[in-house]
Each structure stands twice: as C-alpha cells, then as structure tokens.
Image (cartoon, rainbow, N blue to C red):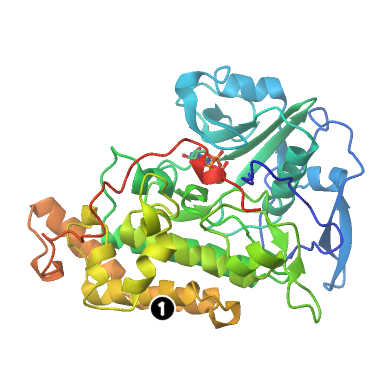
Amino acid sequence: MGNCLDSSAKVDTAQSCLGTSASGTSKNSSKTSSSSAAPSTLTISSYSEKSNGSSLPTPRTEGEILSSPNLNPFSFIELRNATRNFRPDSLLGEGGFGYVFKGWINETTFTAAKPGSGMVVAVKKLKPEGFQGHKEWLTEVNYLGQLYHPNLVKLIGYCLEGENRLLVYEFMPKGSLENHLFRRGPQPLSWGIRMKVAIGAARGLKFLHEAESQVIYRDFKASNILLDAEFNAKLSDFGLAKAGPTGDRTHVSTQVMGTQGYAAPEYVATGRLTAKSDVYSFGVVLLELLSGRRAVDKTKVGVEQNLVDWTKPYLGDKRKLFRIMDTKLEGQYPQKSAYTAATLALQCLSPESKQRPTMSTVLATLEQLDAPKTAARISQSEQQGVPLHHHRSPMRHHRSPLNLTPSASPLPSHRSSACVH
Ligand SMILES: Nc1ncnc2c1ncn2[C@@H]1O[C@H](COP(=O)(O)OP(=O)(O)OP(=O)(O)O)[C@@H](O)[C@H]1O
Ligand SMILES: [Mg+2]
C-alpha cells in the first residue's frame, strides 16, 4: 500500500487513467458479491476498452473495480482460516498500513487450504483506518486488477467486509529487497543478484511507463520490491500509483505523496509528477544496491544521513567509487560494471528531470552489464570456495573514511514510511 503516515491518500479522479494494453488471463469469472460492502460513489478514472479497440477515459466506480474478472472476492472468514486466524507465526512483515501474513488457499475453489497444501499466498490485512486508507486500497485493486507483467506482483483477490480490508497476493518466498540489503541475518546479496534485481525492477517500471496509458508508480523503494525464489523482482504496493499525463500535458499535479529519501526533489517542491519522478527513485534504489545503505539513515551523522547527498561526489569518479560500495560485497564486483551502474544512478538523480534517462534507457544500460555472467561465475566460485580474484577491488581491505559506522543499522519499522510533504 501507499506509505504516507501524515498525509492523505489521494485519488485524482479528474486525471487518473489506466491502460488496458496489459494482457492477463481471467482467473475466476464466476463472482460472488457476498464479501463486498455496498459500492460507494468513489470513482477512479480509467480507460475502458471499447469493442472497436479504441480506449476512452471512463470513470470506474468502486463496484466496477471490485468486479474485475481477474480478482477473486474473499470472505473474511476464508482469509482468517487461510492464515490460521492471522497467527503471529504466519506474519511475514509489517508496513505502515498493515500486516502481511502467509496463508494457504485451494487454487481452484479459492477456499482456505491446510498449511503446506494448495497455493501459498500473502494476505495483507490493513490496520483499521479511515476513508483515505480505503482509497489507497481501492487504487491498488484497480491497478493490479488490470495490469499484468512478470515484474509486477500478482494480486489474486481481496476482501472488503465492514471495516476489514485485505489483499491477497502471490507469495514471494524471498520477501523484500529491503530485508536482504539492510537486515542482519540473510546472506549478503552478490553483485550478480543485485544487478538481476535492478534489471527486474527496471522492467516493471518500464512496463508501467510505456503502458498504453502511462502509469506512474510513485512509491518505488526497496521495501516495495519483492523477490521470488530465483530473485526475480516484482513491484508491489500500487496504492499511490497514478495515471500519467495525457494529451499535451507534461505532468500531473497532485498532492505530494511518497517516501522521504526516494521522492524526486521537483515533485516534492511543486507536486508536479512525471514518470521521471519514478526514474529518480530508481536511481536512489540503485544507490542502495551499490552501497548497502538506506536512502535515509538517521543513525548516521551529517551528510551521510542522506544517501544521495553522501554518494554523489563519488559516483562519477572511477578511483573513488569504492568508498561508497557496500563492504559486504568484499570487493567482489566488476569495477567497470559498478562504475557504469554508478554513472547511471547519477543520471537518474539529475536535479533536472528532463535530463534523467527514460526507464527504457536505464534498462538497456543495465542489461549491457555483464551481470548474468558475473552471477554464474560467482555461484560457481561460491560452490567451489574459490575467490573471484579478477573482481576484487585493489582497495578491498580499505574502508572509506566516510564509511566508518555499520551500514545496516535497523531503523524503526515505519521509518521508511515517512511522508514527504
Ligand atoms: N506478496 C508477498 N510475499 C511475501 N512477503 C510479502 C509480500 N508482500 C509483503 N511481504 C512482506 O511484508 C512486508 C511488509 O509489506 P508492506 O507492503 O505492508 O510494507 P512495506 O512495503 O515494508 O512498507 P510500506 O507500508 O511503506 O509499504 C514486506 O517488507 C515483505 O517482507
Ligand atoms: Mg510495501
């Protein structure tokens, strides 16, 4: 879901629109409305496909959104059973807006299944809140009910019953990128895996930006990048997603929403949103992948609190780049690729939005890196216990004088949900 703690979610009904170019298969066309509350008057503009194939903006009512043939409406009891009464040991994580539980459902009947049988799902249960949380919830149902891509998390269904709002997603076994990069415990991600994740996430954003009707994601950050068993990245949380400008418009004007440290400066300053705002956020996540540091880290002192401010002077300098690279990589990365990725991040972070590359260019640049080869070599050498001699930085034993404190200090659970306002 969106992640703004002190500001309201806003669905701009005047300018929202949604592409129907994405193809998807209908999972469940026989619908019951028993789990849905009476549709409200809230509408979200969208494109609805006409029989002649042309697309015209048509407002989608809540009833229309909820009756998407691609989504299954669940009853609360069914999801309670599927998660064994939302048992604490089923808890996968907590965000600003709710708790996520692991559950099991029968993939044909969509009824609760025994743990270990049927399909594994992730059930997000929103904390009780007001109307604005509902808007974000509905925005997510609207987008994920229509957009399909291997790099977007799949929404299986939802539950709307009284005050209860839940979302049922495909289960992503490796959790979020945030957990892997910043939490102690899991094996540090290798360079090859980091680039694989960057490429997957870039594909997801490119798809949104190039949809027949552009979608601006608005909440690109490490905690919203989920990983499957093979570290394929999928974007989650579409509560803040927004239709891109149409016609001659260059931007959409909107209330500033997003996460501190990731949101583009011109968007924060003016509320003018473009796809290039997402490109900026992508640059921040690329920096997180390179450095293993959070976008904002209040445990650091001075300029190091803000990842962009701290790293910028080093990104375009081949000889100094090692100073901001994640020490958990232990120097095992191809220096040339790291430099290319760093200069790409720098371009994404251009203060002038027009100078930022498109996601298509970003993706092409990342795909040219020798990441897959590197990943193969790393896993081979990991299996054999052989160090990657030619990938070592000559300075791998030196820590930057700017990098003296641990980089993985956990922050409060909702620290990444601070609102830019
Ligand atoms: N589909 C999923 N499969 C597996 N784990 C998931 C899934 N969705 C969410 N999670 C886990 O639950 C955690 C919480 O997700 P959630 O989207 O509620 O919050 P967040 O992204 O961390 O923060 P925010 O509230 O700012 O979005 C994630 O970090 C992830 O570890
Ligand atoms: Mg999230």
Which residue bears the numbered disc 1? 365
Q: Nearer the viewer, residue 328 or 363?
A: 328
178 left or right of 83?
left
373 left or right of 72?
left
- Residue at horizontal 44 percent and vertical 60 percent from the top: 285
Q: Name the secondary structure under disc 1.
A: helix
Q: Nearer the viewer, residue 208 or 320?
A: 320
Residue 337 coordinates in the image, percent (x, y)? 28, 74
Residue 76 coordinates in the image, percent (x, y)? 70, 23
154 left or right of 69?
left
Spot the residue most to the front: 302
> 10 Å neighbourhood of mark 1: few (<14), some, or many (≥20)?
some
- Residue at horizontal 41 percent and vertical 76 percent from the top: 344
Q: Nearer the viewer, residue 353 or 402?
A: 402
- Residue at horizontal 35 percent and vertical 64 percent from the top: 195
Image quarter for residue 288?
bottom left
Residue 36 position (above or below residue 197): above
- Residue at horizontal 42 percent and vertical 71 percent from the top: 345
212 left or right of 153?
right
Image quarter for residue 109?
top right
Residue 372 position (above or below residue 137): below
Residue 194 position (above or below residue 277): above
